[in-house]
Amino acid sequence: MVLELEKSIDDENIERLVRIFYPEVIADKIIGSFFIEKLGNDIKSDKWEEHLVLLTQFWRFVALYDDEYKSNPLRPHFDIVGLNKEAFDRWVLLFYEAVDRVYDKNSGAFFKQKSADIAKNFIHRLEL
Ligand code: HEM
């Protein structure tokens, strides 16, 4: 990541991004059910807390090269029944909205680009 962005993206705002994004995801008509099926609908549950911590680590790995995230981001998506391209488009749109609530234009552009690239890669590898 370029030096300028390193100053504005940090552990605290990445955590804020993740914790703003997932309540919107659960409430969403198009993609909410995929998450509720696996993790339930209570964002305060242990299951969700585990997911939020994991996803915070994932984005710290992407943005800050933090090495706490050691898992495989694509793997669980193979088990989600009915996942399609429309769902991914919706995911990206909701993520962009969350990004806009946390970051200015510059840092936001970084997360938008990364999320869109990863989503595209997932769609390709999941053969959707
Ligand atoms: C409609 C699109 C998507 C749906 C419905 C979805 C759903 C899920 C669900 C339900 C899990 C939890 C699986 C489990 O614990 O058994 C999960 C994990 C995860 N998702 Fe997604 N996801 C989507 C798109 C994305 C995208 C675009 C990214 C990245 C930019 C992403 C990143 C991750 C990561 C990092 C994990 C944790 C993987 C691990 O380390 O176990 N997801 N996703």
Image (tube, helix red, strand yellow):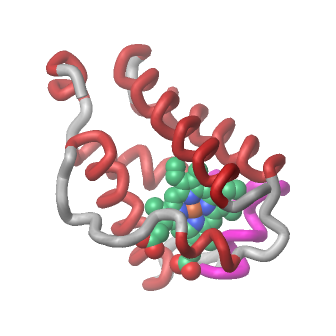
Q: Nearer the viewer, residue 75 or 10?
A: 75
Q: Is residue 59 left or right of residue 123?
A: left
Identify the residue at image location x=42%, y=74%: 49
Asked if residue 22 shows in the view, the reply is: no
On-image quarter of the C terminus: bottom right
Chain part drawn in magenta: 23-39
Asked if residue 120 shows in the view, the reply is: yes
Residue 61 in picture, x, y percent from top left:
27, 52
Q: Quadrant of ligand 1?
A: bottom right
Q: Nearer the viewer, residue 19 or 5?
A: 5
Q: Is residue 5 left or right of residue 72?
A: left
On-image quarter of the N terminus: top left
Does the stretch in magenta take in 27? yes
Count how many numbered circles sit on residues in the image: 0
Q: Nearer the viewer, residue 91 or 125?
A: 125
Does the stretch in magenta take in 25? yes
Quarter of the view holding residue 78: bottom right
Residue 90 in picture, x, y percent from top left:
74, 44
Identify the residue at image location x=42%, y=66%: 52
- Indicate whether 4 appears above or below 23: above
Magenta stretch, main secondary structure class: helix
Q: Is residue 32 left or right of residue 61?
A: right
Residue 79 in picture, x, y percent from top left:
68, 79
Identify the residue at image location x=27%, y=50%: 60
- Indicate whether 69 appears above or below 45: above
Residue 99 in picture, x, y percent from top left:
49, 33
Q: Is residue 85 left or right of residue 11?
A: right
Extreme bottom residue here?
Answer: 46
Quarter of the view holding residue 81: bottom right
